[in-house]
Amino acid sequence: MSWSLLELTLRVAVVATLVNIPLALGVSWLLVKTRIPGRFVLDVLVSLPLAVPPVAIGFFLLLLLGREGPIGGIVHAVLGADIVFTWVGAAIASAVVSFPLMARATMVAMSGVDELLEKSARSLGAGPWRVFLTITIPLAYRGIIAGVLLGFVRALSEFGATITVAGNIAGKTQTLPLALYSAVLLRDDALAFQLIAVIIVIAIVTLVVHNWLLAKTIRAEVS
Amino acid sequence: MTPTTEPIVRIDIVKRFSEFTLECDVTFNAGVTAVFGPSGSGKSTLLNCIAGLARPDSGEITVMGSKVFSTNERKIVSPDKRGFGYVFQTSALFPNMNVWKNILYGYKLTPPSQRSAEPEQLAQLLDLTALLDRHVDTLSGGERQRVALARALAISPKLLLLDEPLASLDVSFKGVIIRYLKRVREELRTPMIYVSHSISEVIALADDMLVLSKGKPVAQGKPSDVLVHPDVGTMADYGTLENLLEAKVVERQPEQGLSTIDIGGVTLSAPDVDAQPGDLLTVSIRAGDIILALDVPSNISAQNILPGTVTEIHAQGPRVLAHVNVGATIVVELTPRAVTALALREGTPVYLIVKSNSVLILDAGGQS
Amino acid sequence: MNNTVLAVILITTAFLIGCSGSSGDGQDEILVFAAASVTNALNEAVESYERATGVNINISYAGSQILAQQIASGAPAQVFISAGESPVEFLRGRGLVDSESALVSNKLVAITKRSLTEQSLAALLSPNIERIALADPDVAPAGTYSREALRAAGLWESLQPKIVLGQDVRATMAFVEAGNADIALVYITDAAVARGVETLDIVPHDSYGPIVYPVVTVKSDESTEAADAFVQFLLSPDAQEIFRSNGFEPVR
């Protein structure tokens, strides 16, 4: 259990979560506050990574982001760099897998904001973007943060997609869950328990804050 | 007599729902226009279409000369650009801001050149100055609606839309809000469209009245005329027609359980009230609780005998509503037989007889 | 609005920096895919190679099947060490194999906590052996070889009711360690890290296999010079000694 392992794991999970936040907010707003056609399809797409085995997601990403893939090919040609088998690939894998959790929690938070308040703001002269920033988000922020934490905790523990698209390369892409996998395979019990303990501590702290935030939201709505 | 006013709103729209179709081709003039009807008649939808919060299937809406919606011209002005204030039934105050910030919300979005009202003045007009830094969750129902009113007026609206603003309020707060609405009408002269299912509110506030039933207009005109219209009769429970009047406390006689109040210069005896002399109240006197006499009756129990003159008589079939000016105008419900028997017409001097406990005090007490 | 745009730019920049910090081609860095079972041996060998040559070796350890799938899906690995032939066949069928050599071999042994009635595979028939754990032949090469050995001993059919399959060799060992199975057939390199069991050399060496761990250079448009050099090192006596000391058998 080294500091660089923890740093890599956190870096991957934090970047994945940060990238997901604007996407989750945007998608949630589209699905909850608008009536655009194709909402149903978008909703299914958003939830899809939940229903698909992470390894399958990993392979899909590998095809997309690998040197011969549509996106990876361009990056390789232009920058001479790979996305796959780097920490960036690991971050993308974590982001995709954890996105549905964040998005669904964000949707719940936003739909908890009374539509009448938003209509009221419109009647007072606020355009949709201003309503979103001054009314929807401030009233939903606790639920949104809870969703972000949920996404973070999922990104942190992501394994199947990560090992497929980023590999299990110590020092470069081996996050805590992957290191745990290797420790178990090699029967290094001492290391395995250490890693489990760290993962559990981070997860517990995150989930406690998440639950506390949601409890505050429920109390606020009831009062 | 209709004064020569330009129509404020021309609305000609169709909007289909599963239960009915809203089909309206009406115009509204300046002043307060009430839109009345049973629930599900489309009155809130009509209001929302004017505000831009609902979209008609087809038609045109013109407000003060400019089109805000037109299918032919493919024009829809978004609600934030229409400049109409909206007061919701449940106030819809923003819980993440205090009272002052709520009031300022739309004010800040109004271009300075278009501002004719200042938030401080509105706060004074609606007696909110002491409440400005309060959190909206700590307010009473009446206080919330006053804030909602101030907030809507702060955008210097061309038109004020109110969707059953009194419906969710406790009886004790209704009087307060009616008083403030009258104040707004008198001092700001903003045209108002007021959706309601209460005929008492309509009588108290409206200059003009549109009745909707199942999405179609049934009658439009002066409230007292419309209220005696045969088609409207089925919708309005006349037993509930109240006179909602502003009154000032003169003095209390708690030992007798009575108080003296002043309505428009004439004093009445009413039940005792928890208020100080000089406090303003709203009282309600049911139109059916008032007896009309041509002569002063003697040796009767009722405390209030008010001299006045008949100013209007609206009669249709079995329904008669008479307006009598005793200092304030009071609406009295009569039978056609009584009208004939007393030979009542405009100008007839009469006496109104009201028991003191027919005078219902609507305020909880004082300035709440 | 501006804050969002700024955030997007910052994240994209970080992303691109992250990417360009890792180029897979080039003379001083190679990406190696290796079966998890060779982890300790390979790490040791690579350490000495890196020290000697200054080349940076990145190794991704996982199951051989998944590694082969990744390569077939465009993973930029240059060297692949597989725990069995079929993942390499899979790649060969897709024209992805440049050169192949046999790196090391392995041996099947039995691990158990029970005492056997006799020191041979026939002991598996006795009633005191209720459950036999094998790696799933469909998924793990060790399972395929185990089946081969049991068939050669004429025991495969009769032992069917007693056999439980583990999805990999580690799971198979865990069955025996936890007491859920009485005996298992595993590689000798796996048995070396098994806990609380006895290792018995009762599987006839010529009844299965040969077990081969192929090392493969992946076909590529870019130069395979560095990859070839590394493979040569792995086949050299020095590296082979490292594998031997970690329990692997030399290639027969």
Image: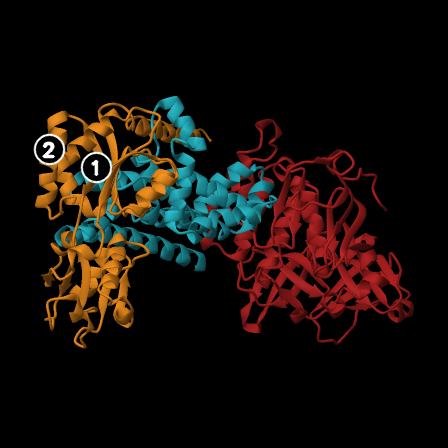
Give the residue type at disc 1: Gly
Image location of residue B223, percent across then percent down: 79, 55
Mark number, residue A138: none
- Whether residue A16 is visible: no
The orange-coloured chain is labelled: C
Q: Chain B's shade in the image?
A: red
Image location of residue C67, percent across then percent down: 31, 43
Q: Is residue A56 left or right of residue C26?
A: right
Image location of residue A190, percent across then percent down: 12, 53
Image location of residue A105, percent across then percent down: 43, 51
Parent chain of label 2? C
Q: Residues within 10 Å of mark 2 (few under 14, many from 20)?
A: few
> What SS does tag 1 mark?
loop
Parent chain of label 1? A
Q: Is residue B155 left or right of residue C225?
A: right
- Whether residue B38 is visible: yes
Q: Chain A's shade in the image?
A: cyan
> Which residue in the structure is indicated by mark 1?
A171
Which is more toward the observer, C148 or B33? C148
> Which residue in the structure is indicated by mark 2?
C48
Give the residue type at disc 2: Ser
Which is more toward the observer, B350 or A171? A171
Residue B332: name its quadrant: bottom right
> What SS does tag 2 mark?
helix
Q: Residue at x 55, y 58 (%)?
A: B277
Which is more toward the observer, C148 or C59? C148
